[in-house]
């Protein structure tokens, strides 16, 4: 069981240290955290911690820190946004893959799952390689769809990297270039590619991407 | 100027403390950070820090910590994923709004901007209210589109909360329920709603959502 809290603090160096100090002293394991600044000089820390004896105690003690302005319990990111499919590529293709993926995710989410479909339209080998690589440092990503007409070169290295290091499943549209050869599955129809990306990660679907050995 | 680094560490309590300790001792301001665990017992810390004299020194010193397995420079999340539009609601509407938003984002991204379109199909008042509220703890969100046929009740409180606390612009489809009355803009056509959400946050578009005083 994971507990999640939102902490609003003043924005100055050392605030995160003070909070992680407290957490570590209490031998609490942080499963996930993120911190960002807003435009009005607050920092927002969201933190998922592994089962603690009394969450209320943790909240009360953190609230005593002078840097903390507000603190509240929160549902976990996993409970709210669930698993993520990322779709990257040309606008025309990304929007069609998204159409398939969102429609399919709807069918699973309505039965109690949580699957998010996150997208960015981008062009150019270097920008695409950078984005594919950056997928590795995003939380909760289960699948990546490369949606375009022509992709190869350094994008391939980035694909190999995230497949190996993060276990992300990669689906590619059937397109010109070497990206096809490095994907777990190649699909010609973009709507179908979106649908299959969701099927591949949904618990309510019986589909194993590693057992599909063909180009569709 | 913001510098970003990726740190792969062993996964045990206190690792984030050790790293934030080092950062705070060196008086470095963390602008954004997130940490998540992968499935093979590593923790991944991504960190954006404000201009430091020598990033190479910081990297070398962090690398000396016994918990650190790998460390590398990274482009910032802002450079890779940019501003975010979040689309939440029923699958049929979400996919159409996404179509408009992705197509419009493509037109801006191709001119050097970075705009991501992130979506989740969800139904039910409580789930929707929870997701709207959770938008507040996501980084880089500029706009939210509520895409459905019927939304009201506690979703309205969540909308008011994120508008006030985080300055997120809210667009609603023209639908049944009270959500309409709390949005910054109400649009009937879902594709157009997606386009306008992107126009409202793009630097390359001349469109001020606060000056549009009508239901489209």
Image (spheres, coloured by chain):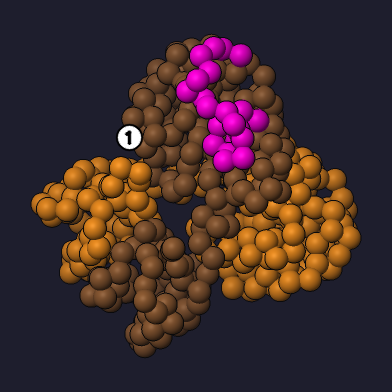
Chain colours: A orange, B brown
User: Magenta includes A78?
Assistant: no
Q: Quadrant of the N terminus of chain A?
A: bottom left
> Residue at image x 31%, y 64%?
B29
Start-end of magenta stretch: B195-216
Residue A147 visible in the snapshot: yes
Residue A12, how many percent across, how many down?
A: 24, 58
With B144 as the anchor, is A66 left or right in this view? left
Q: SS at mark 1?
A: helix
Q: Is residue B8 above or below residue A38?
A: below
Residue B114 versus residue B183: which sits nearer the camera?
B114
Label 1 sits on residue = B165
- Where residue A117 appears, as percent x and y from the top left, is 61, 44
Residue drawn at (66%, 43%) of the image: B108
Q: Is residue A150 above or below residue A118?
A: below
> Which residue is nearer to you in this view: B74 or A4?
B74
How far across and down, in percent of the image, does residue A63 sit?
15, 49
Which of the 4 image quadrants contains residue A195?
top right
Is B175 or B59 nearer to us in this picture? Answer: B59
Chain of the residue on which disc 1 is drawn:
B
Total marks drawn?
1
Question: Which residue appears at 55% of the width and 32% of the height?
Answer: B200
State the residue at coordinates (79%, 71%): A153
Percent x, y of residue A92: 79, 42
| Crowd band around label 1 with a 10 angstrom C-alpha radius: few (<14), some (14–19), many (20+) | few
Is residue B95 visible in the rendered structure shown here?
no
Q: Is residue B130 left or right of residue A104?
A: left
Residue B208 drawn in magenta = yes
């Amino acid at each position: 069981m994971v507990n999640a809290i939102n902490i609003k603090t003043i924005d100055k160096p050392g605030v995160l240290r003070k909070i992680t100090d407290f957490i570590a002293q209490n031998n609490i394991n942080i499963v996930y955290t993120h911190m960002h600044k807003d435009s009005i000089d607050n920092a927002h820390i969201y933190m998922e911690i592994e089962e603690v004896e009394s969450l209320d105690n943790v909240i009360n003690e953190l609230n005593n820190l002078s840097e903390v302005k507000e603190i509240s319990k929160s549902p976990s990111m996993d409970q709210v946004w669930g698993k993520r499919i990322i779709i990257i590529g040309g606008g025309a293709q990304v929007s069609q893959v998204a159409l398939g993926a969102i429609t399919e995710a709807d069918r699973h989410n309505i039965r109690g799952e949580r699957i998010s479909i996150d997208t960015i339209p981008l062009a150019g080998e270097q920008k695409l390689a950078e984005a594919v690589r950056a997928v590795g440092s995003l939380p909760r990503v289960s699948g990546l769809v490369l949606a375009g007409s022509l992709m190869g070169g350094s994008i391939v290295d980035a694909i190999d990297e995230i497949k190996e290091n993060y276990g992300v499943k990669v689906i590619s549209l059937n397109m010109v270039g070497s990206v096809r050869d490095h994907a777990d599955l190649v699909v010609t129809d973009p709507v179908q590619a979106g649908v299959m990306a969701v099927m591949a990660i949904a618990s309510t679907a019986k589909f194993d991407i590693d057992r599909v050995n063909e180009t569709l």
